[in-house]
Amino acid sequence: MKHIVTLFAAVALTTASSNAADFFSTETPEQLFNLGIRLGVNTSNRTVGSENMPGYNVQGWGTGFDLGVVADINIRDYLSIQPGAFFESRSNTYTFINMVPVYGASTDELMTQAGTFNSYALTIPVLGSVRFNITDDIRWNIDFGPYVSLMFGSKLKNKVNHNSFDNDGVPAAGDEFKQKVAPVDFGFKFGTGLQILDHYYISAHYMAGAAGAWKDIKADGIKYTFGGRTKAWVFTLGYNF
């Protein structure tokens, strides 16, 4: 009886070890290098620091799209380094309400500004991807790494731009927000995804900017920094060749 129990225990341990190896395989990958295409949608936000917009300062999330390619450099079956290149479109809404000084007025006046912001960028992430085998046909990926975004277009479109002080019915110029986006953004991208039947891919990632979102300006020898950060959720479909 003792020998039978020992035999069953050995078989159980061997099976568990085999299943663990299948789930987290340290074997040499079948392919050392492969390419994939990605298409996705995002929801993003680009905040403005309160240093120069200290009143009511709110930015809502908007939508955009991502289109890109990735390359998997497979180190082991469970580990890959994945550089990529994406064209990204992003948008968000903004609302500012502040009391501002107006030349010729005895008191500060109310300024209200609201609208939408759009930007376009080339984003290059370099992710480390850890893979687990759920079944023979489904792999689970966990990704993390840095990214850099090179901006090549942006637009601030006011839908409301009003100052309570006017001259003959014409709104006077106030301290409105009209800064340009910073030319370079960088931060971290992390998330998870599933690879199905070796080719099809679905994922969700979060991108957290670590640099100031807006270009600094100088006026009368004073540097104005508008701070803020970029943030985005990206949901992607893809195909791996």
Image (cartoon, rainbow, N blue to C red):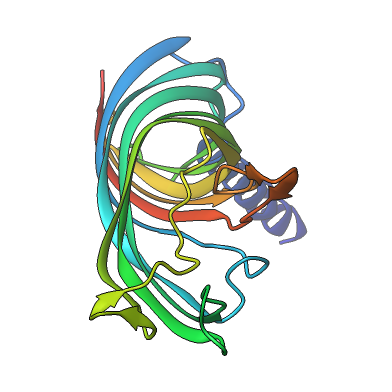
On the image, the x and y values in percent for residue 30 come to 43, 13
**Which residue does the image show at 36% across and 45% down from the upper left?**
194
On the image, the x and y values in percent for residue 158 come to 27, 63
On the image, the x and y values in percent for residue 39 come to 23, 37
Residue lying at the far bottom in this picture: please name it: 107
**Which residue does the image show at 76% across and 59% down from the upper left?**
2
Residue 15: quarter of image: top right
Q: Is 206 left, or right, of 43 in this rendering?
A: right
**Which residue does the image show at 55% across and 49% down from the upper left?**
213
On the image, the x and y values in percent for residue 35 come to 34, 16
Residue lying at the far top in this picture: please name it: 32
Nearer the observer, 203 or 107 = 107
Is residue 21 visible from the viewing direction of this image? no
On screen, residue 10 above or below 48? above
Nearer the observer, 21 or 70 = 70
On screen, residue 106 above or below 14? below
Q: Is 152 left, or right, of 197 in this rendering?
A: right
> How many badges with numbers are in the image?
0
Quadrant containing the N terminus in the rendered view: bottom right
Quadrant containing the C terminus in the rendered view: top left
On screen, residue 175 above or below 69? below
**Which residue does the image show at 45% across and 69% down from the upper left?**
174
Is residue 190 visible from the viewing direction of this image? yes
Nearer the observer, 222 or 113 = 222
Nearer the observer, 7 or 175 = 175
Residue 226: quarter of image: bottom right
